[in-house]
């Protein structure tokens, strides 16, 4: 299964080995699935019984056999892997005739499917064909732009464009929607964007600990929980507002970062990961069982929303945001404000990270990540360095946590399970550790993409009405996590800019950077 | 005293199950130096395979329980071993030469995949099984409290002891065990001396998964109820056990499993049952901080 072509072999030989390989794959798939997919346990009055599902088993094994056969014939062992032209769309290599034939025929087939399916009325196929065409179009556009303007600073343009977009997106879409009465599902878009931005912020916060300092933290959600609960408890008992609690929650989380950081100073690598995981679980179990303070599994509700310089976003009241500015009340105003709050918090996280990287402490983090013993022998105080990394990361986790509490209005220990830590860590690693842009992209793909999957009805057109996309969401999430990691172990953005430069910044391949081994 | 003895018996039975899972962690960590995060879920898959195989044999008319259990044991070990092999092949082997975090991320991904695969294919509700092995021996009675050693507890401890002995023989006496120990010491040097490293690592995963399947079957018989989430907590505790005993050491894993099982049982019996996981996890932190190499582990020397 080497990805290299084997030109010495004839097609017959390759077919033979591909068939053998596919059959072995089929046998393994059968062994894997024969009981777990082939039978389903059903609860009955008499106890558990089995319901055989031979069709499902046959389909699953068939997919493995056919998929493996096609892949090994046309991609893995082929003299000319069919994926080359698609990959070339995103490089600067020249196309040859074969590439153009492949791309053209795929585009033609997709266009034909699009036309036929829209006449017949099969929305699922329309969508798939449109996605394929869109992919090809983006690739062609990219090649075109790069061909005509080879030397533009694309990374910078992309970053600035992205920041402008996220700043303008809610206001513009809101104004456009109101001006033209389009009735867009704005509420859903904003909620999704707020969710994604929360994870971007968490990713950037964890990136300080994992990406810069190289300390593998699997219990980051503990700080998120501390921030959320500190705010919720202060609001419940003392009636404090969001803005007053935000710094307190951040400070409390940072303090917890130091408290939990102290015992693990001597640990490294995977041991550190498992102890931080244990701490995360301990915090969750305590929140769950310390009923007279945290209200246990029932959680805390009625957490206040943030105010705009003391003006609440409410339908009625003495002075509200809407009445002060003479606007008509609209619940979307509050949501847009929340959007800007989390956007501001996330950008502050990013700014602080970028600035800290240039300070001595940031360089000490990176030095410690590369080699702890060497940095210690050069006079870096690793205790302080580690604790500041934990505290800074925890601070942003706490801020994000109190934002989470105010957005939801309700928190319970259920929101702070290990899976949250895993998702945040996956965002950091899949984004390419240390790359701020990569983390943002990974958050959009992993959180936004899979959250959108929860609400799409089109999947039901493909798989039938009883198909529940929400059920398959986490399964696909896990598969994507494994697939992206195997495909690009260094993450989506696999290069980074150096911290200090002499004249011109060259991107460094992240293969040269050691990570996760502090 | 009677209460104490009863808890001791319960703790040993629970600890044996943790020990069996812990062996999978300790072998994999010893040989490739990574936490196989999906191992707890392999245990869960093993329990599900055992449950389905048992129900299937029952529905085929096999009513002789001991024979059915032996068959279930063989089926579960074989099929779970295939799962262990597949997980290694898909998620870990391509990343063998990559940086340390990469296989940990795919392991977490695989753990999510396995949990949700079972949830999707078998449903999210708990799966109860009627007690298969009942009865037991009343050891003695004190103040109205009976100390009972149930048959299933005997089965758990005996199975664990037999498998431990078998594994110790495999590691100490067979060519496979020699290859494993060689890979553990120096993978490059082992491959230069003719050891097939990929095959040895695959076999390690296969053996670990087979043991996890046994643990799954025993768990199913002991508690009589499983769901798709049992792998996570059991996995972390078994890892705690492996670390406690000294990672890389088979007797250490067993010893660690017993200690964790006893701590958990006694904590539940004498303090609060809600905080039993906190006790186990705190134990992990304390052990790692004060005995980073565990009870029976070798100290790790870092060369500069």
Image (tube, coloured by chain):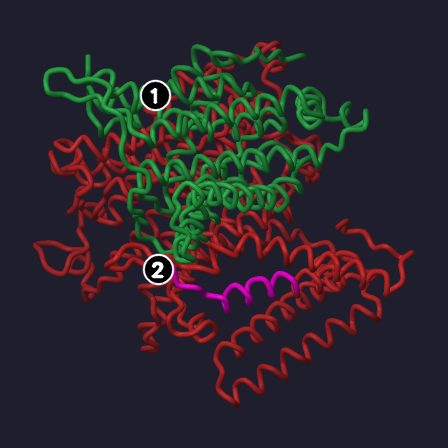
Within 10 angstroms of label 2, few (less than 14), some, or many (20 or more) residues? Answer: many
- Who's the residue at 23% across and 44% down the image? A411
Residue A424 x, y percent position in the rendering:
44, 42
Label 1 marks a residue whose chain is B
Q: Which is nearer the eye, A515 or A366?
A: A515
- Who's the residue at 64% across and 49% down the image? A487
Q: Is residue A223 visible?
A: yes
The residue range painted magenta reads A50-65
Furthest toward the left, the residue is: A318
Residue B65 x, y percent position in the rendering:
39, 44
Instruction: From the image, state the color of chain B.
Output: green
Looking at the rendered structure, whether the residues under marks 2 and 1 are on a common chain is answered as no
Residue under label 1? B282
Residue A73 x, y percent position in the rendering:
76, 63
Residue A498 x, y percent position in the rendering:
64, 34
Left or right: B130 in relation to A438:
left
């Amino acid at each position: 299964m080497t990805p290299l072509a084997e030109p010495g072999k004839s097609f017959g030989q390759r077919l033979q080995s591909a068939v053998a390989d596919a059959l072995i794959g089929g046998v393994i798939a059968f062994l894997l699935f024969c009981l777990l997919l082939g039978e389903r346990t059903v609860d009955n009055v008499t106890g558990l019984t089995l319901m055989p599902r031979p069709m499902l088993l046959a389909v699953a094994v068939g997919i493995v056999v056919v998929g493996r056969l096609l892949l090994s014939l046309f991609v893995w062992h082929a003299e000319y892997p069919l994926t080359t032209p698609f990959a070339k769309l995103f490089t600067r290599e020249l196309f040859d005739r074969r590439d153009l034939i492949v791309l053209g025929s795929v585009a033609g087939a997709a266009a034909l499917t699009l036309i036929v399916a829209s006449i017949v009325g099969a929305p699922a196929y329309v969508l798939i064909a449109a996605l394929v065409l869109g992919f090809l179009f983006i690739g062609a556009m990219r090649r075109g732009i790069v061909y005509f303007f080879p030397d533009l600073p694309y990374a910078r343009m992309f970053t600035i464009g992205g920041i402008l977009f996220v700043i303008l997106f809610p206001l513009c879409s809101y104004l456009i929607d109101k001006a033209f009465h389009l009735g867009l599902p704005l509420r859903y878009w904003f909620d999704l964007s707020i969710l994604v931005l929360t994870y971007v912020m968490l990713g950037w916060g964890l990136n300080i600990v994992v990406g810069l300092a190289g300390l593998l933290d699997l219990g980051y959600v503990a700080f998120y929980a501390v921030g959320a609960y500190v705010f919720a408890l202060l609001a419940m008992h003392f009636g404090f507002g969001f803005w007053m609690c935000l710094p307190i929650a951040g400070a409390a989380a940072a303090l917890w970062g130091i408290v939990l950081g102290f015992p693990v100073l001597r640990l490294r690598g995977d041991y550190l990961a498992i102890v931080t995981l244990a701490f995360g679980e301990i915090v969750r179990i305590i929140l769950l069982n310390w009923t007279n303070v945290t209200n246990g599994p029932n959680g805390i509700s009625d957490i206040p929303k943030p105010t705009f310089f003391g003006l609440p976003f409410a339908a009625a009241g003495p002075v509200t945001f809407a009445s002060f500015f003479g606007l008509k009340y609209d619940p979307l105003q509050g949501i847009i404000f929340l959007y800007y709050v989390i956007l501001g918090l996330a950008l502050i996280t990013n700014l602080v990270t970028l600035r800290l990287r240039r300070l001595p402490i940031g360089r000490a983090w990176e030095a410690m990540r590369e080699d702890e013993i060497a940095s210690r022998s050069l006079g870096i105080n690793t205790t302080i360095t580690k604790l500041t990394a934990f505290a800074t990361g925890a601070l942003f986790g706490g801020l994000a946590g109190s934002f989470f509490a105010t957005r939801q209005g309700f928190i319970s220990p259920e929101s702070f399970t290990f899976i949250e830590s895993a998702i945040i860590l996956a965002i950091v690693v899949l984004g390419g550790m240390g790359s701020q842009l990569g983390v943002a992209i990974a958050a959009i793909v992993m959180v936004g993409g899979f959250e959108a999957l929860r609400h799409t009805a089109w999947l039901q057109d493909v798989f039938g009405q009883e198909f529940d996309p929400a059920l398959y969401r986490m399964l696909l999430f896990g598969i994507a996590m494994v697939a992206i990691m195997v495909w690009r172990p260094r993450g989506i953005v696999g290069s980074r800019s150096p911290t200090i430069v002499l004249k011109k910044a060259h991107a460094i391949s992240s293969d040269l950077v050691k990570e996760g081994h502090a | 005293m009677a209460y104490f003895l009863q808890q001791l018996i319960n703790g040993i039975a629970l600890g044996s199950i943790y020990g069996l899972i812990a062996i999978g962690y300790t072998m994999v960590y010893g040989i490739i130096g990574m936490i196989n995060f999906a191992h707890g879920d392999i245990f869960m898959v093993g329990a599900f395979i055992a449950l389905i195989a048992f129900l299937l044999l029952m529905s085929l008319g096999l009513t002789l329980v001991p024979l059915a259990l032996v068959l279930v044991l063989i089926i579960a070990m074989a099929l779970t071993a295939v799962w262990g092999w597949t997980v290694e092949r898909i998620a870990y082997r391509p990343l063998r030469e990559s940086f340390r975090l990469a296989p940990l991320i795919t392991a977490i991904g695989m753990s999510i995949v396995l949990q949700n695969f079972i949830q999707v294919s078998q449903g999210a509700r708990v799966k109860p099984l009627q007690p298969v092995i009942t009865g037991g021996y009343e050891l003695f009675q004190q103040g109205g409290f009976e100390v009972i050693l149930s048959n299933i507890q005997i089965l758990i401890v005996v199975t664990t002891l037999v498998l431990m002995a078998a594994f110790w023989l495999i590691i100490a006496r067979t060519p496979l065990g020699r290859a494993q120990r060689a890979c553990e010491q120096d993978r490059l040097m082992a491959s230069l001396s003719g050891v097939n490293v990929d095959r040895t690592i695959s076999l390690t995963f296969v053996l670990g998964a087979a043991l996890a399947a046994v643990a799954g079957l025993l768990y199913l018989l002991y508690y009589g109820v499983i769901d798709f989430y049992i792998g996570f907590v059991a996995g972390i505790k078994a890892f705690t056990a492996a670390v406690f005993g000294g990672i890389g050491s088979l007797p250490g894993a067993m010893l660690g499993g017993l200690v964790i099982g006893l701590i958990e049982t006694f904590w539940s019996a004498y303090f609060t049952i809600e905080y039993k996981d906190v006790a186990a996890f705190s134990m992990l932190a304390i052990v790692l901080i004060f005995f980073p190499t565990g009870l029976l582990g070798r100290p790790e020397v870092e060369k500069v």
